[in-house]
Every structure is written in structure tokens, then in C-alpha cells.
Image (spheres, rainbow, N blue to C red):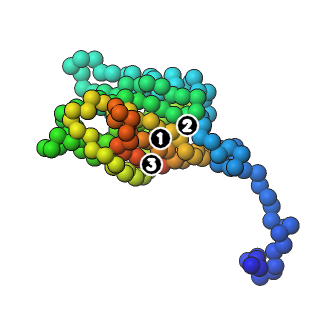
Amino acid sequence: MKLEAFNGSPVMSSDIEKKEALPYARTPENEEYGHKGELSVEETKEVIREIISDRAAPGDTPRGDFQVLMGDFIDYTDDGELIVKYPVKEWQCNGLDVMQGGVMGYIADATFGPLGYAIFSRTPAVTIDMTTNFLRGVNITVAYLIAKTRVLTKGRNIAHMECKLYNPEGKLVMHATANMMKISK
């Protein structure tokens, strides 16, 4: 294939400037998943723990998703995975005693938020799109779900994340991906 400049003159491969990959870009050398935040793993863990642990006092109105969903921080691993445990409650289920798909999506989105906040150095990030795949029903008799969330790629302003929800037996019940955009200050 012959390349031409806008003025019609031929472009030689030696004319094309080669740029190095950005440090957060996925390349064959860094194909492994891992911590992608600007803060250290320990700082990220502390930021997430603060957000998830901030509960309303008894009788007060809940102030955030984790308070409504009652999510409990389990861990933020060295390889960049946020693990949160969510109890299954009656209000989350439909007339067939199965958890509503929208609640599972809500759980994923509620988990993406703190991770986005942490990886963008305490800067809020919002979901700009989310795709969910429901793989197995969650009956009201299930005690809890485990959300395992990680950043797949991160740019200066947008991070692509995934969340997998597992039942207590370790079976995958939902997979979601989302793009989170950092809100400029």
C-alpha cells in the first residue's frame, strides 16, 4: 500500500516518527493485569476502604451506594483487583425471588466508582457506558455476592474496567465492563 501526504507527495517509512508506548498502554511486555493507579497499592487500598466504610449513623439517610447496598471491603490486591462482598437482600429480588439484573448492574457500577476515584488520585470519575452479561440467576436464598473489579486499561482521563460477580460457591453470575471518565477539577 502506497502512503501519500495530504499534498499528494509519497511518504517514506523513514518519514514516519516512531513513538514509544505510553507507560499505561498494554503492550506485549506489560500484557499482565496489574495495579494501574497513580497512588501506591497501599494508598489505593486506604482510599477505597474510606469510601466503602463510610456508613450513615443508625436512623440517618444513607449517603452513597455502598451504604444502600451494604458492601463490605474485602481487599485491594497487589495485582489491582478490588474485592467487595455484598449481601443479597429481599428488596433486591423480583416476584420470583431472583435478584433483579438492574441490582447486579448497580453493584458493578457502585464498585467501579471507588476504584475509579482511587486510580485517578482521589479525583471523581463517572461511568460513561456499561455493558452487563447475566450468566446465572441469584436466588433470594443466596447469602451474598463477591464483586471482583479491576482496571483493564487506563488513560489520562478514561479507564476501562471489568467487574465479575460470584456467588458463594464461586460461580460467575454476572460480568460487566465499563468506561469511567475522570471529572476535571
Please give the residue where the numbered disc 2 appears in the rendered image: 120
In the picture, measured across the screen, residue 64 lies left or right of residue 47, that is: left
- Picture residue at 41% right of the left edge, 50% below the top: 130
Check disc 3: other Cα within 10 Å, few if <14, some if 14-19, many if 20+. many
Check disc 1: other Cα within 10 Å, few if <14, some if 14-19, many if 20+. many
In the picture, measured across the screen, residue 73 lies left or right of residue 152, that is: left
In the picture, measured across the screen, residue 149 lies left or right of residue 4, that is: left
Secondary structure of residue under mark 2: loop
Which residue is farthest right?
A: 14
Task: Between label 1 and label 3, give the one nearer the viewer.
Answer: 3
Q: Position of residue 69 (x, y in %)?
A: 30, 31
Check disc 2: other Cα within 10 Å, few if <14, some if 14-19, many if 20+. many
Q: CA distance from mark 2 to mark 1?
A: 8 Å
Mark earlier in primary sequence (2, 3): 2
Please give the residue where the numbered disc 1 appears in the rendered image: 125
Please give the residue where the numbered disc 3 appears in the rendered image: 177
Q: Position of residue 73 (x, y in %)?
A: 42, 25
Is 62 drawn above or below residue 7 in the view shown? above
